Image (cartoon, rainbow, N blue to C red):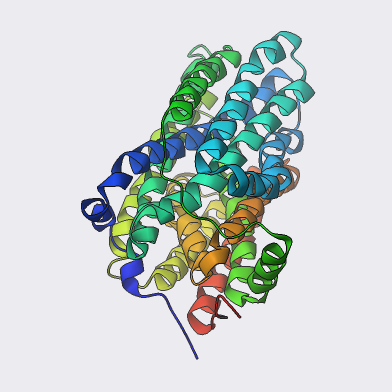
Amino acid sequence: MESYPDRSLFPDFLFATIFMKKNNIYLIPFVLVTSLFFLWGFAHSILDVLNKHFQEVLVISKARSGMIQAVVYGGYFVMALPAGLFIRKFGYRMGVVSGLVLYGIGALLFIPAEQIMSFNYFLFSLFVIGCGLTFLETAANPYVTELGDKEGAAGRLNLSQSFNGLGWIVGPLIGGMLIFKADGSHGSVALPYTLIGITVLGVALLFSRIRLPEIKSEPNTRNAQEKGLNVLWKNKIFRFGVLAQFFYVGAQTGINSFFINYVTEINPGITPRTAALILSFGGMGLFMTGRFAGSWLMHRIEPSRLLGISAMLAIIATVLVIAAIPVVSLFALFSVYLFMSIMFPTIFALSIHNLGTHTKQGSSFLIMSIVGGAITPVLMGALGADNMATGFLIPLLCFAVVYWFSRYYRKGSFFPANA
């Protein structure tokens, strides 16, 4: 028998805050945890500036520069399950603090890295940041869904993810201004990372001194873990959701990584500095707008249907990007950001729906699937070595998988949480 979440599970972002009237105790924790979404949005988006910077300063290929994203997202693959176990044992607050400390240390490692000017040392610093981000996302995503009434869970996650979009705007803006100078030269790459490192460690100190309400987790016994794994991998929707999230993150990361390359190739008159600003206000601006709009639309359109529409529009826009028609393709690239904006939180919410006490364990695997972002930039860099437009065949394939997931979800069935 077909079973779909009630549409009220996906209210607009205004309705998502109604839970606060009923559970005032969750207001401050919700605001504080939502601030974390901004911090990791910034961390991811500034990577897109590093690609072009290192290509020119260290004279490396596009494929090698793709290792920047590979090591960060590789950290998700390595640390997702350990982070989940740590959080179940020590709680959400300690998970957040640990993530922030790792994030801050990795950022400050850019100071000696710039003195050495070794690409491998930069990659190590970014790997440490990736491990920290894994703790943050593994803790924050499911925690937000549990801070209040269940019917507002997906709405709260979409609202928090909207502030993640704000971080995606600020990252290339600050990175572009500080790393790419107006005269075409390159500035200090350590400066923006030093600033963010100090900020993040300050936030870690704040979280270490506040009390967050702990949500009761499932028993952390071997039998409970084995039962959880058995239930999760029997659930076809969850299984496909992990795959869809892998491909979605791959598409988003690949597009972000080579946005500056694509724009400067299709229009040689645009400098990397200008392209970074275009990415900030144009691409990421539409990305954040799309998430707010998506939260509103989900109160009116069934979420999996909206996901399918967005994926199909992203496919059409990506085809135009590959065609490399000067003005048309540039606007098509902007529109991709709008269409893919709702994909991560929607896939996440659809995938963990109906998992019951196994939700946290399922969340760890969904965070682990972010490793897709470690693979596509390398593939896109290799495929687009001579013509960046060709590299966009990779995200085209990824969006096709997301569309397939949306169709499967609407036709599929759920296995009961305690099956």
Image quadrant in which you'd find residue 37: top left
Q: Residue at x 60, y 61 (%)?
A: 362
Pick the front one: 332 or 12: 12
- Is 86 on the left-hand or right-hand side of 211? right
Considering every residue shown, the one lying at the far left of the view is: 21
Pick the front one: 259 or 385: 259
Q: Horizontal and vertical percent for residue 115? A: 71, 8
Residue 186 appears anywhere in the view: no
Image quadrant in which you'd find residue 313: bottom left
Pick the front one: 241 or 206: 206
Q: Quadrant of the C terminus?
A: bottom right
- Is 142 on the left-hand or right-hand side of 75? left
Task: Report the number of numbered marks.
Answer: 0
Residue 415 appears anywhere in the view: yes
Establish if 131 lies above or below 214: above
Q: Horizontal and vertical percent for residue 224? A: 67, 65
Considering every residue shown, the one lying at the far bottom of the view is: 1
Q: Residue at x 32, y 46 (%)?
A: 26
Establish if 380 lies above or below 191: below
Q: Residue at x 59, y 45 (%)?
A: 87
Q: Horizontal and vertical percent for residue 152? A: 33, 61
Q: Residue at x 43, y 25 (%)?
A: 206
